[in-house]
Image (cartoon, rainbow, N blue to C red):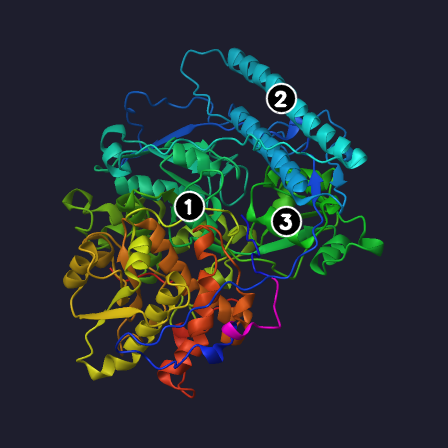
Amino acid sequence: DEPIDASAPNSTNLDPVDDPANIGSSAIPSTPGAVAVFPHDIEDAQSMELELESQETSTSAASPANANISTSTAGGSMSSLPPGAYRARGTGADRARPVGITAGGANTTEEDPEDPEALIEAYTVSETADGETIDNLNQELGAARQQLDVARAQLAAPVPVVEGVPLELEKEGKKGRTMAIGALLIAAVGAVVVSVSVYVTRNSSNNSNDPPKMIEAPAKVKLPPVLETLKERKVLRCGIGSNTRGFSLLSEDTNKLEGIEIDLCRAVAAAASLTSDYHYETIEVTPTTRFLTLASGEVDLVVAGTTHTFERDVHQESAQMGFSFSTPYIYGGLTFSGVPEYVACADELNVVGDCSNLLICVIPGTTWMAKTKALFPGSNIISIPEQATSIQSLKNKICNVIEGEQFEAPEVTVRYYGYDGPYAMGKNSFSKEPLAIVTRDGDTEFADFVNWVLNSLLYAEAQNITMATANTFPKTSLFGDAYGNMFQHAVAAVGNYGEIYSRYLGPIAGRLKVNMLNNGDTGLLYSHPYGQVNTIGPGPIEGGVIERIIERESLCCGISSRNDQSDDKRVGLDIEYCRALSTSVLKGKTDSIEFKEYNSTANIAEALTNGIIDVYAGANVHQHGDVRYQMLSFSKPYFFEPPQEGSLTPGKAHSLVTKEDDAQWSDLVYWIVMATFDAEELGITQATSNQMPLISIFGPSLERVLRNTILAVGNYSQMYQRVFGQDAPRVGRNLLNAPPFGPEHHPLPF
């Protein structure tokens, strides 16, 4: 998927109020103390050049999707599906393939693939144009692009194939829709191109006060909990991507969709089934439709190469809401590949001289596109609908470089799709891409369910529990007695994480080190990308924890009872994170904190539920705290204890914990921890805190939350040294996991 570099321009001249020397004492507070207030900094004016690109007008790249229902039983025989679920006919050779690509990978489009001008045009708005006009044009083009993507998605809408419907009629209907939507695509792009062209020619201003007509997000309807729905429906609906080898691809041997993402869907379906039989349905989504499809309730989860970002967690723009993300199932990064001499150009970010003909195929609606547009001029970028099409475009010389994560375009894959030209993969990675399973905010039980199913696959690998020995996985009462065998069912259906990875990704690119299990010798502090945090989101929700803290003008933070002297040092780190949260919400007030001490998980959960505390710092992350005690939400762990000598069980992992029913507050807490890791990786300290990005996803009043955090407490290394001492050894999992990345998968204890 994508990552976006949202960092603000570096500032070398700090305003006096941004000088860390003016913060006051960095000693650990025991009672509320001095208050430091930091006003907004003044950003230097930036010159702006806006490049607007028209979308590809050919409908040959559209990708029809198919709803494919699969059924599995313990005995391997097909069982009857519930009412309303169709048994798929044509899931093999008859399954519709992307227009323009045949089973053998040959191009069937009638468009001239040699003419890139037929696919993309670039426009540059005069630098003398007023900002409002530029913004309006940019928004209009964005709206048109959304309309194009939705039109393509309608092409890809699931068309159930019911027994008895002649295949010829199905094909005729598909053709009719293709022609109609093709006309819409051409008309939409034509209208925008004409309007932009007229503006560039005449340099006229647009004085309309009417906002551009954007595609509306679905109304926020309260949907029933997924686990309750599944008891009646009995079919898990998974939104998946398409035509990505190793992730989700129609197998020529089995005539079924196969890949790591299909297996993750199967694992959740098996765990959610109350019997040994399980059913699942795959519904194809695109990078631009996946969030809307999930928000509407059409699917229960999305497992389609989706990068976990700050923006998507809090306020994803197209759906106008935030989403819940599992622990990542794959860690990757954006790389370039293709014709060797042009791959070298891309790796060096060079577009002049011999590199001026660099053409990079990119999928819109992804973090890849956002990153690529930040690195290269629009004239070097060509939009294509999916990864398989990018390889076809490379083959047909529409582009000379394609992009993706390391395991998506290795040589074995491009040869599989018929490319026989010179090929090389770049040596540089330009992003972080932690891919996660996505569920809807508001259904905390199902989000926890999905996350613990994924964790069970990692745990099974660590404990050497395989598909053949799945019955040895301990039973659980985590989600009630009805789901006592959920983890056994999941592992029995697909195997442990290592088995899944070896089955689908091993033959393609081997197992990257970052996707191995961490044995405790290397760091686990890995920051996730922020995404488009300049997207304007809602302010603090009414009656939410953030509003409560602002009105109270103080943070109530729970910490561990310090009767145990051996835990005193680590509690100091917990207090540092309380200070970070205080300054993020209260605009620089580092010590407006009321501390309360607790010594049991049950008491902590009760205090969070009753609003006695806003957050608890130092919680031990484990499944019963996550689910049983009132659905708690844990941040990324920030401190790992070593395992007991001779024990195979991982040591305790400490994090911040909040009530899960306030997603906005839980998200802020999660990303404050992430920001301290990110700042250390980027070398941003208290003295250079203005290099942290301004954000708008919590509304304009909280745009400085990340800057204020680092200004107040510094990066993770600074916090660690302040608590444990300048010369204190920092080893094992408490180290940063930065390039070259070490193993990041860390199964949590059951």
Camera-nearest residue between 625 and 747: 625
Q: Quarter of the image for the C terminus: give it.
A: bottom left
Using the image, tell me which numbered label, if any, was put on residue 538.
1
* Spot occupied by residue 328 in the image (x, y as percentages of width and height): 42, 54
Q: Quadrant of residue 24?
A: bottom left
The amino acid type of the residue labelled 1 equals Pro
Secondary structure beneath dot 1 equals loop
* Spot occupied by residue 163 in the image (x, y as percentages of width and height): 40, 15
Residue at left 41%, top 16%?
162
Q: Is residue 60 left or right of residue 219?
A: right
Residue at left 27%, top 34%?
224
Question: Which circle's residue, 3 or 2, is located before the other in the chain?
Answer: 2
Residue at mark 3: 403
Residue at mark 2: 184
Mark 3 burial class by Cα count in 10 Å: few <14, some 14-19, many 20+? many
Camera-nearest residue between 606 and 200: 200
Distance from Cα at disc 3 to Cα at disc 2: 29 Å
